[in-house]
Structure formats: C-alpha cells, structure tokens
Image: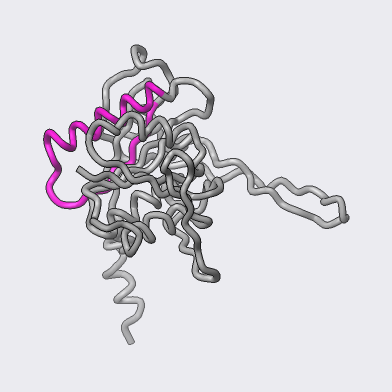
Amino acid sequence: MHILISNDDGYLAPGLAALVEAVRRFGDITVVAPEQNCSGASNSLTLSRPLSVRSAENGFRFVNGTPTDCVHIALTGLLDRVPDLVLSGINDGQNMGDDTVYSGTVAAAMEGYLFGIPSIAFSRAEKGRTNWEAAGQVAARVVERFLDRPLEGPFLLNVNIPNIAAEQMGPIRCTRLGKRHKAEPVIRQTSPRGETIYWVGAAGEARDAGPGTDFHAIAEGCVSVTPLQIDLTHVQQMDAVARWLAP
C-alpha cells in the first residue's frame, strides 16, 4: 500500500503530522505538502513560474506552490509509482457545505481523484491545539474501512471530524453537503501608506444544517463523511438553456 499525503496548512502543520502518524501502519507514506499555508487556494495551479520541491529533515517534501500543485507534481513526475490512495489534511478548521468550493484541503484530494485514485480529505471542524490524536484515530478508521471494504472505482470523500476527545465522539455518518448564508462583508482598513486595503470577511453561518447534512452531524458530535463529485453540469437546466438558445 502506497499513500500520498498532502494538505493546505503547510508541511509544518500539526494536522499533517497527526495524519501521517495515524496511517503510517497501513503502508509506505509519501508526503508532498505546500511550503506555506494555502487555505482557500481551491484547485489553483501555479502556471506563472516554475516550482521547486525540497525535503525537510523528517522526510516530508514541500513545494513552493498550492495544494493542487503538490499532488499534481507528485503524480506527474515526482513519484516513481502511482499511489493507491491520496489523503489530504488533517485541516485545522471545517470544510463543510460551500467551504468545499474554496478549500485547498479538498482540492488536494480532488486532484488525486481526477487522476483516478481513491482520495479522502480530512478536516477538524473547530480550530485548536488539542484532540489531534483523536482526529488521527478517526482518519485511521476511515482508511482501515477502505482497506477492508473497498468502494468500487475511484471516489472522493470529504471527512469532517468534531474537535472533541475520542471517547466523546459519536459514530461516523454518511452526509450531504449543507449550505451557508452569504459571506460576511469585507473588512476595510487603511495601510501605513494610506491605501485602502481589504480583508475577506468570514464565511456565513450555516443556512441548511438539517438532519442528513455535514453541519448537523458535527453539531451532534459525529463524524461527517460526504461523497463528492466533480461534474458541474446543471442537468436540470439543460432543456431550458437549449430552448433559450434555439433560433
């Protein structure tokens, strides 16, 4: 078993270390992660400059690029063999509902999925310095389930884990993505040079957080596992758009 691991918090992130330690027993581990925190990078590739890959003392490799860069480079030239599984995380903060559109954590796993490799993104739903080991235990359980009972074909799973002790954690639930309210307004400030600058506002609160959603599972102390797909075609609008385009 060969597992490729990346993240978006950077190669020094405690969540990455927790994930590596948790799944090390399952096979050979290769880590290729960003040099810097790349939260919100989504699926961006760096095309305006060359990228470099360096090695840390612990054997992790890090790239001066995005999470997608890391997995893409690993799969298209860095690795000698195709991994059996791509993991991303464990992110320090939730990636639920609309977050998945912006998430670098999800994007790293999605890049593996695009290459036809089973891929899983892991996030801890609340930031903090504690319970990393508990989050790692959940990740190990999910990977172990994949080894014992493989899903057919490539898949992309988005896993969110409550930031609580292992003994307090509820069961793992299969969920759908919830939805958020629109984001908070930007924060406008003035730089030391007198220029107006803007900070992107916080994500909106959950709007669709009912039973069956990832938000609902986390609120009840359970682990949320959401299968994702990439086809963005709005199938229900196909006929309406075709009629709209007709002469």
Compared across the picture, whether 1 is left or right of 45 comes to left
Q: Residue at x 31, y 26 (%)?
A: 138
Could you say which quadrant of the image residue 247 lies in?
bottom left
Q: Nearer the viewer, residue 54 or 75?
A: 54
The residue drawn where x is 34% and y is 56% is 111
In the rendered image, residue 187, in percent from the top left (x then y), is placed at 71, 46
Q: Quadrant of the N terminus?
A: top left
Residue farthest toward the front in the current orientation of the protein? 57
Tell whether position 148 is magenta. yes
Q: Which stretch appears magenta?
A: 133-161
Q: Residue extending furthest top?
A: 167
Q: How many marks?
A: 0
Q: Please say if 105 is above or below 52.
A: above
- Above or below 239: residue 125: above
Nearer-the-camera pick, 67 or 175? 67
Q: Position of residue 95 (x, y in %)?
A: 43, 40
Residue drawn where x is 46% and y is 63% of the image: 45
Q: Position of residue 150 (x, y in %)?
A: 13, 41
Q: How is the image coloured?
A: one colour
The residue sitting at 32% across, 24% down in the picture is 137
